[in-house]
Image (cartoon, rainbow, N blue to C red):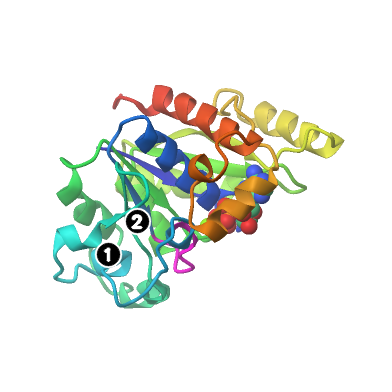
Amino acid sequence: MVTIAIANQKGGVGKTTTAVNLASYMAASGRNVLLVDIDPQGNASSGLGVMPSRDRPNSYQLIMGEEIDRKALLHPTKLRKLFLIPASIDLVGCEIELANSQDREIRLKKALSHFEGDFSYCIIDCPPSLGVLTVNALVAARWLIVPVQCEYYALEGLAKLLKTVEIVKKRFNSQLQIAGFVLTMYDARTRLSKEIVEEVRRHFPDRCFSTLIPRNVRLCEAPSYGLPILLYDAKSSGAEAYKKLTLEVLKRCAKAG
Ligand SMILES: Nc1ncnc2c1ncn2[C@@H]1O[C@H](COP(=O)(O)OP(=O)(O)O)[C@@H](O)[C@H]1O
Ligand SMILES: [Mg+2]
């Protein structure tokens, strides 16, 4: 199982949209995919039509190591090969509840190891912070994808994220690598978008995916129907972009090494 974390401590940059649609296109192309929502807001869960609830098995229980039936954690989605471990608002407590735990950074990694044989890919949608949940995702992951919004201050905070990656690599997970930066909400009509793309590519010449995700209203409508873009409007520009991005990601993250 190849695990990919989608992270950026900034909110609203397209993490969840990227996680849901990447996972969906991977599943549509025949891979068994597990999407794990560890954001207490649960947008990836609701975006796939599963309302986050503390009453159903969820990622909080997974991380806290509660005794639960492993199979019950896996929620089916409208795509046969895509399964979801939904979030719960209880995740907001993890920071404090795990503060004194010896193994607080490696909880998710341990828990996900039980699913190793069942899935080819595991995508983790992170919350907008660099706290214990995101660190757990980075420890569990082989690859990191960083969505970057084509807006002012796009690069703000990236240095801090990269520093966190270095610490995680040194202390917990030497395998972790940045698969790439994805430029999201690109608007070809604006000069700003073009400038941001140039700037990010200049800073990270080898690490930017060539697919640009356009600003596309269909991408923000789809979650309110609980559908990934490929089931909501497969012909939209947003759908085509995520399909293309998925091919790039599969190429880059296919094998360990
Ligand atoms: N390419 C896009 N075009 C238009 N709207 C988008 C696009 N990507 C994301 N959005 C919208 O922007 C908001 C933030 O995106 P989201 O993926 O939830 O970001 P994050 O998970 O980083 O907070 C959501 O309302 C989402 O629907
Ligand atoms: Mg999100």
Is 175 inside the magenta-drawn segment?
no
Per the image, the residue denoted by label 1 is 63
Disc 1 residue type?
Answer: Ile
Q: Is residue 208 left or right of residue 252?
A: right
* Image height of 243 relative to 145, above or below: above
Q: Is residue 34 visible?
A: yes
Q: CA distance from mark 2 to mark 1?
A: 9 Å
At horizontal 35% and vertical 62% (from top left) the residue drawn is 86
Q: How far across and how far down the image is residue 93, in percent?
A: 38, 77
What number is the disc on residue 200?
none
Q: In the picture, which quadrant includes the C terminus?
A: top left
Tell me which segment is drawn in magenta: 38-44
Q: How far across and how far down the image is residue 82, in percent?
A: 33, 45
Q: Secondary structure at mark 2?
A: helix
Q: Secondary structure at mark 1?
A: helix
Q: How far across and how far down the image is residue 52, in percent?
A: 40, 69
Q: Which of the 4 image quarters holds residue 36?
A: bottom left
Disc 2 residue type?
Answer: Asn
Chief SS of the magenta region? loop
Q: Which of the 4 image quarters holds residue 62?
A: bottom left
Whether tag 2 and tag 1 are in contact, CB under 8 A, the answer is yes
Closer to viewer: mark 2 or mark 1: 1
Q: Residues within 10 Å of mark 2 (few under 14, many from 20)?
A: many
* Image height of 12 relative to 180, above or below: below
At horizontal 59% and vertical 45% (from top left) the residue drawn is 159
Q: How far across and how far down the image is residue 70, in percent?
A: 16, 59
Per the image, the residue denoted by label 2 is 136
Is residue 128 or residue 205 the one in the foreground? 128
At horizontal 75% and vertical 46% (from top left) the residue drawn is 151
Q: Which of the 4 image quarters holds residue 45?
A: bottom left
Q: Residues within 10 Å of mark 1 (few under 14, many from 20)?
A: many
Mark before the other along the chain sequence, 2 or 1: 1
